[in-house]
Image (spheres, rainbow, N blue to C red):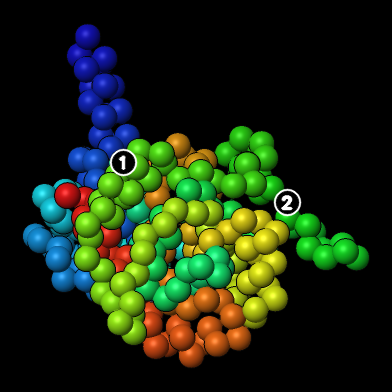
Amino acid sequence: MRSLILLLFCFQIFTIPAFSQKKKIGIIGAMPEEIKLVLDSLKERKDTLIKGQVFYSGKLKNKEVVVVESGVGKANAAFSTTLLLSFFDISQVIFTGVAGGLNPKHFPGDIVIGTSVFHHDYGQILPEGLVLRKTRNVLNKVQNPLDFKCDSVLIAKATRAGIGLVLQKVEKRTPGIYTGKIATGDVFVSDKKKAEWLFNGTGSSAAEMEGAVVGQLCYQLDIPFLVIRSLSDNANNEATVDFNTFKVIASQNSALLLLRILE
């Protein structure tokens, strides 16, 4: 009997994540601008360094959260998200940040609440062009879906949270909040033809560089996730100039929606 109790005690110790015994909401942003408002609002902040990456724990709107700046691009996002999910007991993940708009009806400052995310640069190059392929789940060797669906409950909460939310204006225009599919790739899209291909060919509303990685990891580990993107540009030939002009406002608008969701 004593051996059984000891065994159960050891099992509990080694199955509890290293830095947390309580479920927390994981919040990820790629750049400093994307998490600045979040960190400024964080209460009871505690910084934890893991493998050179800083994780910020604390409370947002009385919710226990862990915030991390992932860095730009798929490899950086995979590194940071893996550490987040490995060392903290995360119940759900929300990515907040900026993106290039693909829908010609959307403009800088607008927000896209992701319904799904996918890799727009993963596939096979054939004579007729790039053909998108499915990734493979390293855990069970089975092909993943082409699109990783964001959690329906989080989408509903985000949609409700956006009602009446006052966003920062961009050039005297009040931004809108929409839902849509989000494309992820290791490229900064700043070409009108590529933007049109992504919109017309895949039905995507926004293009960015991290979301599908987060979606894939969360899908494979059965963790609910949501990607929120505020548009900094329209992914066209003027995207670089617009990105530098509007990335701060767009980052803040995305974070404002995130904070409202947590309420």
Camera sees residue 86: no
Please report the residue visible at 30 percent of the width from the left and 82 percent of the height from the top: 172
Q: Secondary structure at mark 1?
A: strand
| 5 on left or right of 222 | left
* 155 vs 162, nearest the viewer: 162
Can you say which quadrant of the picture contains the N terminus? top left
The amino acid marked with disc number 2 is Arg
> Of 122 and 57, which appears nearest the observer?
122
| Nearest the eye: 44 or 149 | 149
224 relative to 236, above or below: above
Disc with the residue nearer the chain's start (2 vs 1): 1
Give residue 97's quadrant in the image.
bottom left
Residue at 24% in and 46% down:
24
Whether 132 is drawn above or below 233: the answer is above
Horizontal placement of 59 versus 172: left or right?
left
Q: Position of residue 4 (x, y in %)?
A: 26, 14
